[in-house]
Amino acid sequence: MPSRVPNGVKPTALRRAGKVDDSVPDATERDPMMSALLDERIPPSFVRLDDADDENVVTRVMNLDTTVSKFELLLSLGRVAQQDDFTAEDLDSMEGALDTLNELDDNENIDQYIEAKLL
């Protein structure tokens, strides 16, 4: 767990603010739960939406019909986005590639492509 999350809220404050109920079976107050999107390796540009109906890198990844870990895929794409020469055009290209993968029907080939090219 990071010592500081991107918005400046310490993880201990997040644990104290949350309540555990029956919606999370097997969880206790000692089990910290934090959104994967708070991971600093996933850039804000992957989450940002201009409109409520828009999509972004996260929504496109989550829509993929794949057995590959979507969290690992987001982290891998995040490493690419953290390169100094990564541009808005690169982000558009990444989103376009994810759109193309979402349109494919062959799940086995989608998994193989992701594992070979994106992880």
Image (cartoon, rainbow, N blue to C red):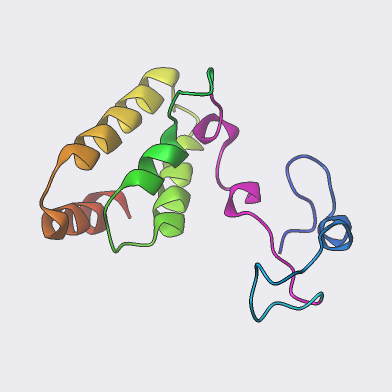
Please name whichever residue, 59 or 113, is drawn nearer the observer in this view of the structure.
59
Q: In this view, does 4 lie above or below 32?
A: above
Residue found 56% across the figure and 38% down from its top = 43
Asked if the stretch drawn in magenta spans residue 85, the answer is no
Occupied quadrant, residue 6:
top right
- Could you say where residue 67 lies in the image, as x and y percent from the top left? 29, 64
Q: In this view, does 54 lie above or below 13?
A: above
Relative horizontal placement of residue 68, taking residue 14 as reference (left or right):
left
- Could you say where residue 4 lies in the image, as x and y percent from the top left? 79, 52
Residue found 85% across the figure and 53% down from its top = 10
Residue found 71% across the figure and 64% down from its top = 1
Occupied quadrant, residue 33:
bottom right
Please name whichever residue, 60 or 25, is drawn nearer the observer in this view of the structure.
25
Occupied quadrant, residue 92:
top left
- Could you say where residue 112 lies in the image, as x and y percent from the top left? 17, 59
Highlighted magenta segment, given as a residue range = 30-49
Relative horizontal placement of residue 5, taking residue 55 as reference (left or right):
right
- Could you say where residue 106 lies in the image, as x and y percent from the top left? 10, 52
Q: Magenta stretch: dominant SS?
A: loop
